[in-house]
Amino acid sequence: MSENLYLWIKAFHVVAVIAWMAAMLYLPRLFVYHAGLPAGSRVQSETFKVMERRLLKAIMTPALIVTWGLGLWLAWASGFYASPWLQAKFALVVAMSGVHGFLSRAVKDFAADRNTRSQRFYRIINEVPTLLMILIVILAIVKPWS
């Protein structure tokens, strides 16, 4: 494999990660506002439903797929797959994917008018991807235990 190809794949992996994280940080913020709507705000609620669905389907899930696909390819091509730092990073990315799944479920709950969680809950959940992202970036850049 050429070094040039590896760098291109790495660049697209980073772009996919940025898109995924932007959506992972924005979607819970939409939920904060959606959960806080007063009763009878039908038009506003429908607008949020469209925004949430489009963010999930057009950006967040495709970015997750590209992130995982290119990330696994990079781990294999670089030979880092056995490194402790990458194993730790992998565990955190699995956790991030779990948060993605939780947020996907919340989109469905809001769409069906079944949300039971408060604005405060979504404000707290909004911090989880941030914390995971910080740890993942540190592992990817610093590569401790290599």
Image (cartoon, helix red, strand yellow):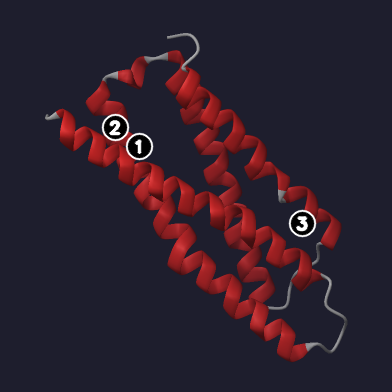
Q: Tell me if I can see residue 69 in this picture.
A: no
Identify the disc placed on residue 74: 2
Residue at (51, 37) in percent of width and height? 94
Q: Residue type at mark 2?
A: Leu
Q: Secondary structure at mark 3?
A: helix
Mark 2 residue crowding within 10 angstroms, few (<14) / some (14–19) / many (20+)? some
Identify the disc placed on residue 71: 1
Quadrant in the picture for the N terminus? top left
Toward the top, the furthest residue is 145
Q: Secondary structure at mark 1?
A: helix
Q: Which residue is mark 3?
A: 122
Identify the disc placed on residue 6: none
- Tell me if residue 114 comes above or below residue 65 in the rendering: below
Q: Residue type at mark 1?
A: Gly
Residue at (57, 61) in percent of width and height? 104
Could you tell whether 50 is left or right of 42 in the image? left
